[in-house]
Image (cartoon, rainbow, N blue to C red):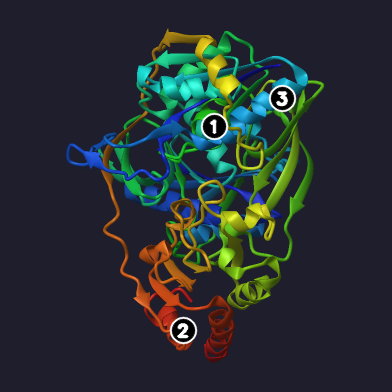
């Protein structure tokens, strides 16, 4: 089975988020970048597990510049077989999805597994766009994925429960928590990653459909109003009369 | 020109998040001086469809075709795009729900439309360009997205705006999507609904608890408080990881993101990963023994105290409040 895992590079969860140029540009200074957690922990690891069981190949693809190499090598250290870096700035989701689709079109993957969302723009976009560009079925928010006889059996989240579905390969899967257990690269993996193939390819032409024109950081932390544990009635009163939420 | 809102159905009822999306679509149509239409796929009663008029929908296009009763992103995308094209829709609005999160980007590609995922406010139009606000970096910032394409797709973050209802009823018109059985890609094998509780994503009040509760046997009072308040229950990640609570209750960066009107956090310290899932809540109440818990910095109201003493009192006071109102 041939599996493609698109990986994104995002600011570490604990990063302080700031902007420059009159709040129009994200400020990367002092930010630690990591592989997007749902891509790494769930999409990539489940792809590797499926390959270990059934044979095949796991390819990671990343749209970004040379400074993304560390993130790509980590994916190889965890167990991907080879990597493709599309040498371009990931300007918007449609541009990124177009790059991934252009690569996938020529390669006939059985599965494309993405993380459900990236933790920078929280947009849940790339998987669905890739599926539509390739005219493939897609299932997202998947917490269980098995493949047998060319059919993927998946459990996905619905509002207030879960749904078990079957879809014939090839398809695009959006991975979330519980799909796999995160793996920490071991020394052998780290050594092997140094020599695994990493192909750099130019970007294909694609439109940019959205532009972020400005950012804002919420006003300083809320002022917490404290209520005495001996006067819980006061809390109920405040929630009703002041906050008007009950 | 028209604005088309895609409305989801669950168990024969319009989903709450879709009512919000339809309201959002109507407000956009009002701003543009154009028609507000809705599209509904699958089996549902005509009476239920007509209620969309209450949030400003003039006409509902209804594909009364049982093949749509199971969600299939490819099939749905084809049908919604067809309806949007037939209606000459220049804006398509969906809910940023589990299904909408997958449908909207597909539609964006199919309609060659710029897409804003998870809008939290109505768009501002500047000529043909729409500017829409959404939250980014897990709620640590917001961004203004500009879309200049002729067609636009917007998905609306649940609980972002409260629909104002009128007494109108919507006209219902049959819509036949040109889909064939070959377009169906997904077979639903089973559905597992958690019954007897309010789905977390739809709840207006959420009572959540964490490690401060000391053990799964102590959740009785949390469930009782939730029941009294008509709230859903949630939990922090460590508690779900040790199986004190089911995983579907886990809110936070790797779990669910929710935006209720009221979030009550009991015995949760408020790690940044947890806050990422709840900081869109309108009002946050924190109850914790540790006055230094970081959660208090994100709270509107706080009680520094022992949950085992405060929660029973809160149940009692809420009962009194309910009896009096």
* Residue B56 vertical position relative to residue A139 in the rendered view, above or below: below
| Chain letter of the residue beneath label 3 in the structure image | A
Mark 3 residue crowding within 10 angstroms, few (<14) / some (14–19) / many (20+): some
Q: Residue sitting at 71 percent across and 25 percent down? A: A50
Which residue is the site of mark 1? A39
* Disc 1 packing (10 Å; few <14; some 14–19; many ≥20): many
- The kind of secondary structure element at disc 2 is loop
Asked if labels 1 and 2 share a chain, the reply is yes
Q: Is residue A238 above or below residue A194?
A: below
Residue B85 appears anywhere in the view: no
* Circle 3: element type: helix
Name the quadrant containing residue A206: top left
How far from the left and from the top, in percent, is residue A80?
A: 59, 19
Q: Are marks 3 and 1 on the same chain?
A: yes
Lower position in the chain sequence, tag 1 or tag 2: 1
Read off the residue under disc 3: A50
Query: Where is residue B146 shown, x and y percent of the image?
Result: 31, 36
Residue occupying image coordinates x 57% and y 27%: A185
Residue matched to label 2: A229
Q: Residue furthest front?
A: A187
Quarter of the image with the N terminus of chain A in it: top right
Report in which chain the residue with disc 1 lies. Answer: A
Q: Residues within 10 Å of mark 2 (few under 14, many from 20)?
A: many
| Callout 3–callout 1 Cβ contact below 8 Å | no
Q: Would residue B49 appear left or right of A32 to someone viewing this image?
A: right
Q: Nearer the viewer, residue B287 or A147?
A: B287
Q: Which of these two is toward me, A204 or A15?
A: A15
Q: Residue, x 61% and y 65% (percent of image)?
A: B233
């Amino acid at each position: 089975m041939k599996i493609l895992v698109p990986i994104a590079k995002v600011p570490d969860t604990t990063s302080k988020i700031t902007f420059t140029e009159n709040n129009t540009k994200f400020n990367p200074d002092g930010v630690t970048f990591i592989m997007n957690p749902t891509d790494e922990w769930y999409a990539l690891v489940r792809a590797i597990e499926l390959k270990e069981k059934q044979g095949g190949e796991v390819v990671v693809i990343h749209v970004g510049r040379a400074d993304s190499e560390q993130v790509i090598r980590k994916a190889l250290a965890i167990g991907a077989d080879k990597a493709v870096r599309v040498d371009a700035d990931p300007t918007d989701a449609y541009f990124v999805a177009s790059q991934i689709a252009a690569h996938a079109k020529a390669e006939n993957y059985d599965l494309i597994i993405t993380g459900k969302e990236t933790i920078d723009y929280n947009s849940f976009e790339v998987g669905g766009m890739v599926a539509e560009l390739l005219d493939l079925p897609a299932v997202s928010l998947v917490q269980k994925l098995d493949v047998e006889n060319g059919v993927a059996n998946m459990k996905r989240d619905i509002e207030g429960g879960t749904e078990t579905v079957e879809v014939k390969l090839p398809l695009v899967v959006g991975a979330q928590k519980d799909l796999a257990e995160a793996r920490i690269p071991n020394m052998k993996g780290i050594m092997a990653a140094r020599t695994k193939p990493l192909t750099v390819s130019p970007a294909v032409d694609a439109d940019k459909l959205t532009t972020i024109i400005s950012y804002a950081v919420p006003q300083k932390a809320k002022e917490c109003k404290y209520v005495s544990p001996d006067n819980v009635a006061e809390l109920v009163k405040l929630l009703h009369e002041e906050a008007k939420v009950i | 020109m028209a604005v088309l809102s895609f409305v989801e159905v669950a168990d024969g009822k319009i989903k709450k998040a879709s009512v919000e999306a339809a309201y959002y679509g109507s407000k956009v149509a009002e701003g543009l001086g154009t028609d507000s239409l809705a599209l509904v796929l699958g089996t549902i009663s005509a009476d239920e469809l007509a209620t969309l008029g209450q949030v400003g929908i003039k006409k509902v296009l209804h594909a009364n075709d049982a093949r749509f009763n199971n969600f299939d992103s490819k099939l749905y995308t084809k049908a919604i795009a067809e309806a949007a094209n037939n209606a000459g829709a220049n804006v398509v609005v969906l809910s940023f729900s589990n299904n909408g999160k997958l449908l909207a980007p597909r539609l964006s590609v199919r309609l060659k439309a710029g897409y804003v995922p998870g809008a939290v406010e109505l768009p501002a139009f500047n000529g043909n360009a729409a500017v829409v606000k959404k939250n980014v970096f897990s709620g640590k910032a917001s961004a203004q997205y500009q879309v200049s394409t002729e067609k636009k797709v917007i998905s609306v973050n649940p609980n972002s705006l409260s629909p104002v209802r009128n007494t109108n009823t919507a006209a219902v018109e049959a819509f036949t999507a040109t889909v064939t059985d070959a377009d169906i890609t997904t077979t639903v094998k089973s559905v597992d609904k958690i019954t007897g509780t309010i789905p977390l994503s739809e709840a207006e009040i959420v009572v959540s608890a964490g490690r401060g509760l000391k053990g799964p046997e102590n959740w009785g009072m949390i469930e009782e408080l939730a029941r009294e308040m008509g709230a859903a229950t949630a939990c922090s990640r460590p508690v779900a990881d040790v199986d004190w609570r089911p995983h579907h209750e886990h809110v936070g960066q790797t779990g669910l993101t929710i935006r209720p009107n009221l979030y009550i956090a009991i015995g949760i310290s408020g790690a940044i990963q947890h806050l990422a899932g709840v900081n869109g809540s309108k009002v946050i109440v924190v109850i914790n023994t540790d006055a230094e818990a970081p959660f208090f910095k994100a709270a509107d109201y706080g009680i520094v105290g022992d949950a085992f003493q405060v929660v029973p009192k809160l149940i009692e006071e809420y009962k009194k409040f309910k009896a009096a109102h």
